[in-house]
Every structure is written in structure tokens, then in C-alpha cells.
């Protein structure tokens, strides 16, 4: 029987390099001698870190020097998402203050009701309310001061954005060129084929619009082209934790998908490594960069906050006849479980009728719980609809602004329906300002009352 090698002697890893577990020294060597590639999410998250973590990560990037590289597609995604990222950051503080004010009003009402029912003196009520006011004011001030600190580091104005200024210096002449027209066309075909046959990377983005779902593969192809040119081991830094990039053991990310490691080795003759940004900081000592205590934890915290919540696990117990949801922490009867599903569908239908009108239908299997929403169509175009309480308006607006199912040319923007309760007191001016802000992000904002009825004049105030 013949062999495909010139020597009969091979080791256990020869031809199976993708199974080798990287050692600390492998990562350090790739960081100090190899090509280090940054994904778009690494750049965008610089806006979300505190100053210390941001400065540390930028220092590491700067120390890598000419071996640092960003694919053109990653930079394209950075620019596409930069303003919505800034908008979400600005809105988070407002969202927190609004929630505090609502809680303050509820607390005042609770104290007043208690003192009245207990026939207690007004001075006790006033003293307790005064203490509450001081506590809420202190917390509100702390939130606003932190928001001012965060805002001072970045702004929509690209000439005044300090984070962008640092990035421009660190990434000067370190961003790749786009693929040629011919190569881009081939890459689009390949990306769609991989999505169809669930080959990494990018197939988990199959539900996105065509221009967006091929993004991961374009990053990958551009990375491969650059690594071929440089013939260097490559370290890819990304906050993306989806399974079409990583090999996973339970919740532990062990390295790149073996298919990707094999493809990389066949194309370049080199090895591919992957790390999350917090792990990059853990290896910063190999670059002689001193990292502040807590920076890696801050980066990890931000990365975890950006991960989508997994769908709840639902299993039917044959022994008890109950439905277990999640990790066995909650069990409900099948009737209660499906009643909850029915209620969610009814809410979606009511909201759809209120904000879209006749002629629109919910697409099958598009209902989601985090955040509440669905995808709708009128037979010609698709658009995403999100809804939730006023306290979550900023996070909902961020999700709607990053929606992938809409047709702007036909005026079919994503829809955000904010449900107000009795404690949400909004003036016409506030509603108008929120509608205009949403419009700047191409989101159609509506306000509903608790029975999912459109509040008259919410769009015309």
C-alpha cells in the first residue's frame, strides 16, 4: 500500500495540527512574532470600557506595531456600527436615571400610603421622603457624573472623538484593502454556500440580510489573504463567541473551529490561534506592557454583557408531566407553559395591529423573548418589530437600530413599540424628542398604553 509522504515516519500531530491544544508559549510567540488581527467588535468595545481598560488595550495594540492588522471588512463594520454604539452608551445613563425616578415616585407613594393607613404623623412621612430624596439624588448624581466622564472620551464628531483619535494613530497603515471586484464576487458565492451547508465561519448569521450575513466570511477570507502574504502564524482577537468560530467544551472556548485551523494551515502553512480581548491583556507581559489590575476583568465584563442570552432549554419530564425551563430552576405544567406562549403570540398580534395596521403578518418562527420582538412582512418587504417597557427604551432602541430586516427605500424601517404604564409620565415634548432621536437611527418609534393601544398623537405631537 502506498503512502502520500516521502518518509514512513510521522508523529501523532502530523496532518492533525488542528487537534493540538495551544500552550501559553504558543500564544506569546504569536503575539510577539506573528500577525495579530482585530475583529470589529474589539474596536467598538473600546467605547464601552472604562478609561483604564481602554488605555491598556490600546497600549497593547500599539506595542504590537506593524504586525497589527485589521481586515477591511472589520473596519467597514466598525464604521457602520460606531454611531449606534455611541447612541446606546449615551442612552444607558438616561435609562438608569428614568428607572430611578420611577422607583422614587413609587417609593414616595408607598410611604404616603403606609403613613396614612397607620395614621402616622405627617412629619414622619416627610422625614422618610426626605431621606429617600437624598439617597436617590446621590445615586442620580453619581450616574450623571460617570456619564459625563464617559462622554468626554468620545463623541459623534470624529474630530473630537478621543477614542477614534487613538485608534487612528495605532492603526495607521494597518488596515487591509477590500477584495477586488472579482474576488469579492467569488467570496459572496462561497459565503452563501457555507451558510447553506453550515460550514464555518458565518453560517449562524443566516437570518441576517445578505449584505450582513456574509460579513464573517469576508473577514475570514481577507485574514487568509494577508496571512498568505506574510506567511506568519496568526492570532485572531475577537469578542464573537458563536460556535461558527470557536471549538467549545461546555462553556469553555478552546480555540478556533478545527475546520478553520485546517483551512488556515492548508492556505498558509502556518498555525491559527484565537483569543478574546481579555485574554490578550492576560498575555500583555510578553510585550512588556504593564496592565492595571482589573483591566482584564473589565474587558471580560463588557464582552459577557454583549453576548446574547441563550434560548431557554425546555424539556418535558415523563415522570412528572411537567415542563422544565432553563436549568431545572422552574417547572410549570404543560398547560401553563403553552398558555404563556399563547399570551406572547397574542401580545405580538395586538402590537402588530396597533403599529403596522392591516396587511402585515408575523413570519413563522420569528418570535423572540430577549428582547421581545418578531419579524413581520406584508409580502413585499420585511421589518423587525421590538417592544418593551419604557424603562428599557434605550437598550430596545439599540437593538432596533441594529436590525437587519428592513427596506429603507420603501420606508419600511424597524419598529419600536414602547409600552407605558401609569407611572410613566411623559410630556408631549419628551415624546417628540424621543421620536426624533429614534428617527435619527432609522427606527420608527410608537408609544402604547398597557392594553397595547396606540396612544393618540404620539407621532404627531
Image (tube, helix red, strand yellow):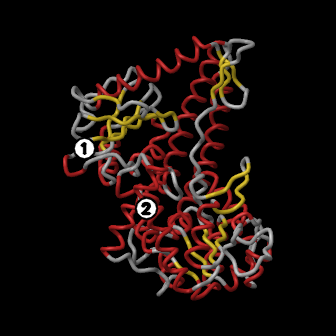
State the residue in front, 421 or 256.
256
Residue 293 place in picture, x, y as percent: 77, 69
From the viewer's perspective, is 239 left or right of 180?
right
Quadrant for residue 317, please give it: top right
In which quarter of the view is residue 7 placed?
A: bottom right
The label on residue 343 is none
Q: Position of residue 122 (x, y in %)?
A: 63, 23
Q: Closer to the camera, 390 or 427?
A: 390
| Mark 2 residue crowding within 10 angstroms, few (<14) / some (14–19) / many (20+) | some
Give the left or right position of residue 345, taking residue 253 as reference: left
Which residue is the extreme one toward the front? 1
Labels 2 & 1 near each other (Cβ < 8 A): no
Residue 272 visible in this rendered orientation of the protein: yes
Give percent across and percent down for residue 308. Answer: 56, 46
The residue most toward the left is 410
**Position of 204 relative to 182 (above/below):** above
- Tell me the residue at 69%/71% (across/down): 2
**Disc number placed over residue 215 in the picture, else none:** 2
Residue drawn at 34 percent across, 33 percent down: 447
Residue assigned mark 1 = 412
> Which residue is depicted at the point 63% across and 27% down?
314
Is residue 150 visible from the viewing direction of this image? no
- Which secondary structure, mark 1? loop
Element marked by disc 2: helix
Amino acid at each position: 500500500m502506498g503512502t502520500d509522504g516521502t518518509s514512513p515516519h510521522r508523529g501523532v500531530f502530523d496532518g492533525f495540527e488542528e487537534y493540538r491544544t495551544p500552550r501559553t508559549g504558543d500564544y506569546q510567540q504569536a503575539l510577539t512574532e506573528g500577525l495579530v488581527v482585530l475583529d470589529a467588535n474589539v474596536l467598538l468595545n473600546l467605547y464601552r470600557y472604562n478609561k483604564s481598560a481602554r488605555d491598556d488595550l490600546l497600549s497593547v495594540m500599539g506595542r504590537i506595531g506593524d504586525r497589527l492588522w485589521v481586515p477591511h471588512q472589520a473596519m467597514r463594520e466598525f464604521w457602520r456600527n460606531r454611531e449606534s454604539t455611541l447612541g446606546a452608551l449615551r442612552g444607558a445613563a438616561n435609562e438608569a436615571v428614568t428607572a430611578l425616578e420611577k422607583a422614587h415616585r413609587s417609593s414616595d407613594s408607598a410611604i404616603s400610603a403606609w403613613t396614612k393607613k397607620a395614621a402616622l404623623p405627617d412629619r414622619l412621612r416627610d422625614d422618610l421622603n426626605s431621606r429617600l430624596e437624598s439617597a436617590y439624588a446621590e445615586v442620580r448624581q453619581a450616574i450623571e457624573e460617570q456619564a459625563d466622564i464617559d462622554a468626554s472620551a468620545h463623541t459623534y464628531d470624529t474630530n473630537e472623538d478621543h477614542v477614534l483619535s487613538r485608534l487612528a494613530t495605532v492603526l495607521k497603515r494597518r488596515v487591509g484593502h477590500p477584495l477586488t471586484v472579482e474576488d469579492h464576487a467569488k467570496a459572496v458565492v462561497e459565503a452563501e454556500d457555507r451558510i447553506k451547508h453550515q460550514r464555518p465561519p458565518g453560517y449562524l448569521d443566516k437570518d441576517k440580510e445578505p449584505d450582513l450575513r456574509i460579513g464573517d466570511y469576508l473577514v475570514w477570507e481577507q485574514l487568509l489573504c494577508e496571512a498568505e502574504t506574510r506567511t506568519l502564524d496568526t492570532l485572531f482577537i475577537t469578542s464573537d463567541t458563536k460556535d461558527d468560530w470557536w471549538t467549545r467544551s461546555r462553556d469553555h472556548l478552546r480555540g478556533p473551529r478545527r475546520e478553520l485551523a485546517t483551512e488556515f494551515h492548508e492556505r498558509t502553512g502556518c498555525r491559527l490561534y484565537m483569543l478574546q480581548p481579555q485574554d490578550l491583556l492576560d498575555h500583555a507581559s510578553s510585550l512588556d506592557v504593564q496592565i492595571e489590575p482589573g483591566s482584564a476583568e473589565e474587558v471580560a465584563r463588557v464582552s459577557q454583557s454583549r453576548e446574547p442570552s441563550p434560548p431557554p432549554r425546555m424539556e418535558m419530564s415523563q415522570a412528572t408531566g411537567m415542563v422544565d425551563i432553563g436549568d431545572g430552576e422552574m417547572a410549570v405544567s404543560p398547560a401553563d407553559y403553552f398558555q404563556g406562549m399563547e399570551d406572547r403570540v397574542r401580545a405580538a398580534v395586538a402590537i402588530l395591529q396597533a403599529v403596522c395596521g392591516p396587511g402585515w403578518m408575523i413570519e413563522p418562527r420569528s418570535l423572540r423573548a430577549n428582547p421581545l420582538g418578531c419579524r413581520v412582512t406584508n409580502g413585499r418587504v420585511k421589518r423587525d418589530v421590538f417592544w418593551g417597557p419604557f424603562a428599557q427604551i434605550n437598550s430596545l432602541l439599540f437593538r432596533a437600530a441594529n436590525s437587519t430586516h428592513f427596506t429603507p427605500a420603501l420606508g419600511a424601517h424597524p419598529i419600536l413599540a414602547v409600552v407605558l404604564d401609569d407611572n410613566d409620565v411623559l410630556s408631549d415634548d419628551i415624546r417628540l424628542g424621543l421620536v426624533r432621536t429614534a428617527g435619527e437611527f432609522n427606527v420608527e418609534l410608537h408609544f402604547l398604553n398597557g392594553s397595547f393601544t396606540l396612544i393618540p398623537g404620539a407621532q404627531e405631537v
